[in-house]
Amino acid sequence: LGCGAGFPGLPLAIVRPADRFLLVEARQKKVLFVRQVIDRLQLRNVASIHLHLRRGNGRNELGSPVAVMVTRALSLAGEVLPAAAGMLAAGGRLLLSATAGNREVFHRQLAASGFLRLVREQEVEIPFLGQRRYLLLAEKIGKQEDG
């Protein structure tokens, strides 16, 4: 979710050709760029769609639930968890990137969701920037389908 210029989805699709990837982005110009890269590199295991989380949770666009969702830079926690409710398969995993400022917000919302549980958290430092981020791994435990 929020693939931007295709990271981390495009590199993952290159190194994991047996897996399928769907890159979701709200900005059409970024989707068009990613599609051009996919075409130029002739990647057959990845697609990119234009979807804004505020306008829907993606259930209709995907057709079937996904096993893993990754969000890199979405700032509004209130958009990520409702999307995960409708898009993640039972037992599916959600990997979030959080700043120190929104980490606690994600913790509270995960706990209150009733369908996601925090499995792991890891602090990382962004090279050359000296900034700290937190990778949060959550698992879908409930059968809730609406956000």
Image (cartoon, rainbow, N blue to C red):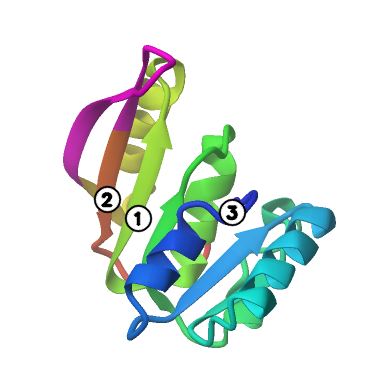
| Image-based side of 139 in relation to 13, left or right | left
Q: Residue furthest left?
A: 120
The residue at which mark 2 appears reads as: 138
Q: Amino acid at mark 1?
A: Leu
Residue 3 tag number = 3
- Element assignment for label 2: strand
User: Which stretch did the figure color magenta?
Assistant: 119-134
Q: Mark 3 against mark 2, which lies toward the viewer? A: 3
Judge from the rendering whether residue 28 lies leftward or rightward of residue 17; answer left or right: right
Looking at the rendered structure, the kind of residue marked 3 is Cys
| Residue 145, visible in the rendered structure | no
Looking at the image, which is closer to me, 107 or 120?
A: 120
Residue in view at x 79 percent, y 65 percent: 32
Q: Is residue 62 left or right of residue 50?
A: left
Q: Secondary structure at mark 3?
A: loop
Q: Quadrant of residue 39?
A: bottom right
Query: Dot 1 surroundings within 10 Å: few (below 14), some, or many (20 or more)?
Result: many
Spatial CA distance of label 3 from label 1 is: 15 Å
The disc at residue 94 is 1
